[in-house]
Image (tube, grey):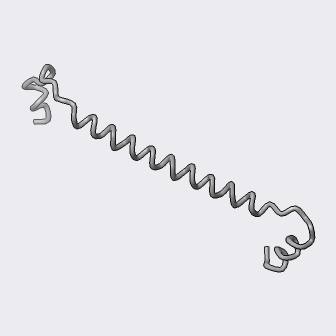
Amino acid sequence: MIMQDLIEVKYSGQVDHTMDYAKVAVQTIAVLMGGFVIWRSVLAYQRRQISSRRSNSYFETKYSKHWKK
C-alpha cells in the first residue's frame, strides 16, 4: 500500500488490522527466539553431561581399539 491509501484507511473509519498483524509478528519472533535459546541451552547441557560421564572399560578390547588398522 502506498502512503495515501494508509492515510485514507486511517481516517475513513474502516477497521485497521495493522497493529494486530504487528503484534502477531512480534509474538512469532519472540517465540522463535525463545525456542532457539532453549534449544541451544539444552544442547550445551547434554554436551556437558556426555563429557562428564566416566568411560567404562568393559567393552574396550584389543580389537575395538585397533579395528581401523
Among all residues in the image, which is located at the extreme top?
Answer: 58
Among all residues in the image, which is located at the extreme left?
Answer: 62
Picture layout, residue 57 above or below residue 32: above
If the image is split into quadrants, where does the N terminus sit? bottom right
Rendering coords of residue 20 (x, y %): 75, 57
If the image is split into quadrants, where does the C terminus sit? top left
For the residue pair 63 and 27, the one nearer the viewer reads as: 27
Residue at x-position 23% and y-position 37%: 51
Among all residues in the image, which is located at the extreme bottom?
Answer: 4
Find residue 68 and report its image quarter: top left
Find residue 26 and report its image quarter: bottom right
Picture layout, residue 17 above or below residue 44: below
Rendering coords of residue 17 (x, y %): 80, 60
Rendering coords of residue 41 (x, y %): 39, 45
Q: Is residue 16 left or right of residue 55?
A: right
Residue at x-position 10% and y-position 25%: 63
Residue at x-position 15% and y-position 21%: 59
For the residue pair 62 and 8, the one nearer the viewer reads as: 8
Find residue 5 and report its image quarter: bottom right
Residue at x-position 13% and y-position 19%: 58
- The total number of labels drawn is 0
Q: Is residue 33 left or right of residue 46?
A: right
Rendering coords of residue 61 (x, y %): 10, 23
